[in-house]
């Protein structure tokens, strides 16, 4: 089994998230992509606009009928309830450890993230260990050429060496000082730069924001629950 963990605020989930997951699925022949809304991100102390429970519900609607996309509650609130989560941070390292323990033996686990998240990786809890808990899949952004080794190395925690894998474009071997190895795959030419402003305009019925950025089911949920007003 090849399973990718795709964590994020999903506030709200949009077509760009699904496009990144599809690109990862096709590039690495993934069996599953787990969409995991995060309760509380340590690097975003202001939190999300919608509640965790609403973001879970919207994510479930966004990926409905999408082959091999599944909702994951691996990044649920650490205590309290879905509607009233605590402000205890959800650390990706802890989530990956729990996820590995719950998966069948010999499962290949991948961590799917955007280029902006990769470049913040050195600030994460147990940052140097994360690339060796799961292979990395990184969705590029317009104007970011992470295929350049110097740019890629600058985004990784100190002590990790990066080498291209021969005859496998956009794939790199990562090695740390303990000689652990992992793989990093770049998803190139992804141009799904969707801003919060664009999303809000579409939510509020602005006809200029075309084509649709959010599924109709998610949009109906937002209006029914009076979110983002």
Image (cartoon, rainbow, N blue to C red):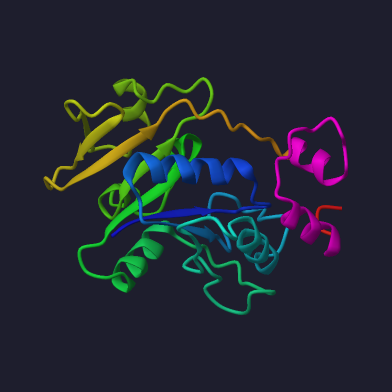
Looking at this view, is 209 or 52 the one in front?
209
Total marks in image = 0
Horizontally, residue 70 falls left or right of residue 220, namely left
User: As displayed, is residue 96 above or below residue 76?
Assistant: above
What residue do we see at 19% from left, 26% from top? 167
What residue do we see at 35% from left, 48% from top? 127
Q: Residue furthest left?
A: 179
Name the spot of residue 11 as percent of width and height, x first.
Answer: 67, 52
Looking at this view, is 225 or 96 the one in front?
225
Name the spot of residue 125 as percent of width and height, x first.
Answer: 40, 54
Horizontally, residue 116 falls left or right of residue 198, namely left
What residue do we see at 82% from left, 46% from top? 203
User: As displayed, is residue 95 above or below residue 181?
Assistant: below
Name the spot of residue 158 as percent of width and height, x first.
Answer: 28, 37
Horizontally, residue 224 falls left or right of residue 74, namely right
User: As displayed, is residue 212 above or below residue 98?
Assistant: above
Based on the picture, tell me whether residue 43 belongs to the magenta stretch: no
In the figure, residue 175 lies in which quadrant?
top left
- Looking at the rendered image, the quarter that the N terminus falls into is bottom left
Q: Which stretch appears magenta?
A: 197-225
What residue do we see at 73% from left, 57% from top? 217
Name the spot of residue 43 as percent of width and height, x first.
Answer: 54, 49
Based on the picture, tell me whether residue 201 belongs to the magenta stretch: yes
In the figure, residue 204 lies in which quadrant?
top right
Looking at this view, is 119 or 67 the one in front?
67
């Amino acid at each position: 089994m090849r399973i990718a963990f795709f964590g994020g605020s999903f506030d709200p989930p949009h077509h760009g998230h699904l496009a990144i997951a599809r690109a990862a699925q096709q590039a690495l022949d993934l069996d599953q992509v787990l969409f995991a809304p995060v309760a509380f991100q340590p690097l975003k102390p202001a939190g999300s606009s919608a509640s965790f429970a609403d973001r879970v519900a919207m994510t479930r609607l966004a990926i409905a009928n999408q082959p091999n996309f599944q909702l994951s509650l691996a990044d649920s609130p650490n205590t309290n309830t879905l509607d009233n989560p605590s402000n205890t941070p959800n650390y990706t390292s802890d989530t990956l450890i729990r996820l590995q323990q719950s998966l069948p033996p010999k499962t290949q686990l991948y961590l799917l993230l955007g280029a902006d998240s990769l470049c913040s990786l050195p600030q994460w809890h147990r940052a140097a260990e994360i690339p060796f808990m799961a292979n990395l899949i990184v969705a590029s952004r317009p104007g970011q050429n992470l295929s350049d080794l110097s740019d890629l190395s600058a985004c990784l925690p100190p002590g990790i060496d990066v080498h291209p894998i021969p005859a496998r474009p956009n794939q790199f071997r990562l090695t740390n000082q303990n000689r652990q190895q992992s793989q990093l795959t770049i998803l190139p030419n992804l141009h799904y730069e969707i801003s919060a402003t664009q999303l809000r305009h579409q939510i509020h019925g602005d006809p200029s924001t075309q084509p649709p950025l959010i599924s109709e089911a998610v949009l109906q949920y937002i209006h029914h629950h009076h979110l983002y007003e």
